[in-house]
Amino acid sequence: MQVTGHIPELRDIIRGYKKEGKRVSFVPTMGALHDGHLSLIRLAKKHSEVVVVSIYVNPKQFAPNEDFASYPTSLEQDLSFCEQEGVSLIFTPDTDVMYNQELFFSIDIHTLNEYLDGASRQGYFQGIALVVNKLFNIVEPDVAIFGQKDYQQYKVIETLVEEFNHGIELLMAPIERASDGLALSSRNAYLTPAQREVAPLLYKSLMSAKKQIEQGMKDWPTMFMNLQQALSEAGFRNDYFGIFDTDKLHPVQQIVDGQSYLIAVAAYLGKARLIDNVIFTNKTLIKGES
Ligand code: AMP
């Protein structure tokens, strides 16, 4: 496994792989790797001979009030996980490599970010679009892998790939969870033991919303209000909880058979901002189906 923080060296190495006719897949991360990240790497391995992982905490996607300065890091452990998973190349740039000059351009996002994290986190997806656009130009992978945990991010990047003609195949990996249902996240490291005990309630609330909707619950505002009330009584500070179409990510007022929907939740627990989601296809009313 090779590790570099330098763009020309990275490009040289990748050019070498491509000359040998090898497919290159790419897993961008912010480090503090856990089994969720490793599942992306495993999926990447199924689709290519070479897996490139980037480890870079991108300052542009953090608002001033967010946790950039305290974001967890564990580079030594990350490298050893990657080595065990058979990663070929790790890109660990410093910020003066990624943003080595005053920026003259930005990427504006006109759609897909009006709700969910786009509404809650100022400049978040602009920062992600910027860094991913740069990383795609640097790595030039054949395939890139992102997690469903950040479904809105996936949709933004899907659109970025189309609109900027990156010609990269995108894959979405399912959400990896702890045995009690909590979605794995680098930010779970912020949870105290007592908060960690409470945290799986987020996933339970999500499952409860899905079940109620599938059973025909129509009064979603009251349902989401009640679920948020229970979260708040357990110590969460609510951000959003709702149901959205999986394409444009707009809130939906009613569901149609055969369509897919995203139920998504975000809430703070202590210092940690936790997000989770579930995608389901409404089949309850399809005639002839049991
Ligand atoms: P991050 O390091 O948080 O920027 O995440 C890097 C990639 O890992 C993103 O594509 C995330 O969606 C994905 N990811 C994070 N947590 C999980 C998880 N629990 N299961 C699957 N993918 C995840």
Image (cartoon, helix red, strand yellow):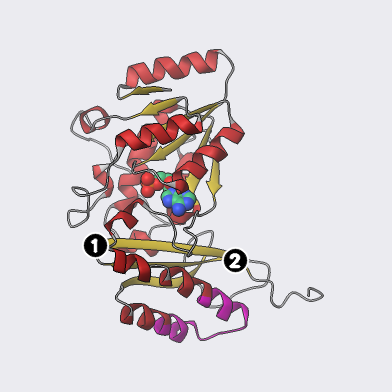
Residue designated by label 1:
271
List x then y, in percent, for residue 22. Answer: 57, 20
Circle 1 or circle 2, nearest the eye: 1
Kindly identify the residue that appears in the image at 38 percent across and 58 percent down: 113
Kindly identify the residue that appears in the image at 69 percent across and 72 percent down: 283
The numbered dot on residue 280 is 2
Nearest to the observer: residue 154 or residue 24: 24
Name the chief secondary structure element in magenta. helix
Which of the two discs, 1 and 2, labels the residue nearer the N terminus? 1
- In which quadrant of the rendered image does the C terminus lie? bottom right
Examine the image and state in which quarter residue 224 appears: bottom left
C-alpha separation, residue under disc 1 versus residue under disc 2: 30 Å
Kindly identify the residue that appears in the image at 55 percent across and 74 percent down: 210
Label 2 residue near ligand 1, CB within 8 Å? no
Nearest to the observer: residue 281 or residue 130: 281
Q: Over which residues does the magenta segment extend?
A: 208-226
Q: Amino acid at mark 2?
A: Phe
The numbered dot on residue 253 is none
Q: Does residue 223 appear in this view?
A: yes
Above or below residue 128? Residue 118 is: below
Examine the image and state in which quarter residue 128 appears: top left
How crowded is the residue under tag 1: few (<14 C-alpha within 10 Å), some, or many (20+)?
some
Whether residue 76 is in magenta: the answer is: no
Label 1, secondary structure: give it: loop
The answer to whether marks 1 and 2 mark residues whose Cβ atoms lie closer than 8 Å is no
Label 2, secondary structure: give it: strand
